[in-house]
Amino acid sequence: MLMSFASLTQRLSAYVRARVDGWRSGSSESQVFTLLVLLGGVTLSFVVSWSAYDLLPLTAYFVWLLIGMLLLRFAPLVILSAYVGLAATTALVHEGAVTGARAAALASLAVAIALILYQSSRQRSGLPMPLSEALLVDLRDRLRSQGTVPTLPAGWEAQSAVQPANGGRYAGDFLVVDLRDDRHLEMVLVDVCGKGLTAGPQALQFAGALGGLIGALPPRELMLAANDFLLRQHSDESFSTAVHLLVDLEDGSYAITSAGHPPALHWHSHTADGQRAWEIDNARGTALGIVQHPELHGTVGQLAPGDALMFYTDGVIESRGSDIDTGIAWLQEVAREAVRLGFSGAARRIVRRVAQGDDDRAVLILARSVDVGIEVRTVSTAAG
């Protein structure tokens, strides 16, 4: 008897999981099944309301509308809403005259149905609200995974911090990384046109393209291929700024290729006058996706032990009250203060100093430790 009950429980659990997985897939079959279940629930509610209206008055039918909004696509939701409206109205009329509070409740039900159907019709994904949100979260996580810096050899530390516009969860700034043979590190920091959630789809598409190019092409050719990709989008808002970094982790030599991106900053741990500071790199260039042959600027250098490179997007330095040069000077001072306690967590501390605004902000720091025997830490955070 106990084994039969356990077997029945397992079968029921497997059936429920299969139905839930089917609903998560958004398939037409799962939508039909969900609609039938909800219609059955509304029917049972109607039977109770018909015989004992006080147990299930008209207001109880709002629950079925809310459940339908969460579980159904637009077309099945229209059917459910019509059925709910018919059942609730019929039960109300059967109970007595529709006047006063009952008339107001019926009007509220009609308004609720209209608002729920309008909201569902605006879902561009065509999926119920929870599935649409899950899809966006998955896309965001995939975009972040593209910029996860792998564990670096001892003596190197990479960290990044991103703050989406207006405190949101989606940004148009992203990072693509590739590490070959534990020696050659490539990173591309990109700022696509747009900000926040509106820039998310374009950022994901462009990140996928760059993810297939990085490591396969030399820096300049990679940037030119990325430019061609954006031009093929045939959109006035498909341009992006980008900066490419290639570092030899054995000797610290590096090459920067910039396409319209704000200039990188180089932290020198040893200077002639003994004053450590962030110095401006001269690579600028033209943004990608604007002209067929963009102007790409490049610089080369070497990171000595204790040195660092910092890259950032324009949301960190631009504001309505100052120009770019003023913003860079502000960042140099803020970054100098941020590294007084060490490079660990510096990117996050810098982003937190940036005023909340309507543009995405991203900071990337690559540092070489003074003591090459120190175990490296790689940090990637979403600043909050």
Image (spheres, helix red, strand yellow):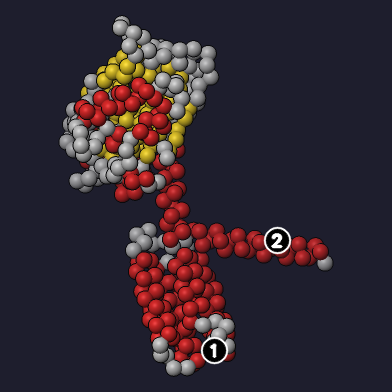
Element class at badge 2? helix
Give left or right: position of 287 versus 209.
left
Q: Nearer the viewer, residue 232 or 58?
A: 58
Few, some or many residues within 10 Å of mark 2 (<14, 14–19, 20+): few
Q: Is residue 233 above or below residue 82?
A: above
Q: Is residue 183 visible?
A: no
Q: Position of residue 297 (x, y in %)?
A: 22, 23
Q: Is residue 37 visible?
A: yes
Q: Which mark is residue 21?
A: none
Query: In percent of the image, x 39 and y 70: which residue is there?
Result: 116
The residues bearing labels 2 and 1 have C-alpha atoms spaced at a distance of 37 Å
Quadrant location, the C terminus: top left
Q: Position of residue 198 (x, y in %)?
A: 31, 49
Query: In percent of the image, x 38 and y 81: which residue is there?
Result: 107
Quadrant location, the N terminus: bottom right
Q: Residue furthest right?
A: 1
- Identify which amino acid the numbered label 1 is placed on: Trp
Q: Nearer the viewer, residue 105 or 1?
A: 105
Query: In percent of the image, x 36 and y 42: which residue is there?
Result: 164
Q: Find residue 188 and report its image quarter.
A: top left
Few, some or many residues within 10 Å of mark 1 (<14, 14–19, 20+): many
Q: Is residue 57 above or below residue 235?
A: below
Q: Nearer the viewer, residue 272 or 120?
A: 272
Q: Residue furthest top?
A: 272
- Identify which amino acid the numbered label 2 is placed on: Gln
For marks 2 and 1, the one nearer the N-term is 2
Q: Which mark is residue 10?
A: 2
Mark 1, residue position: 50
Q: Position of residue 44 (x, y in %)?
A: 57, 81
Q: Are marks 2 and 1 in contact (CB under 8 Å)?
A: no
Element class at badge 1? helix
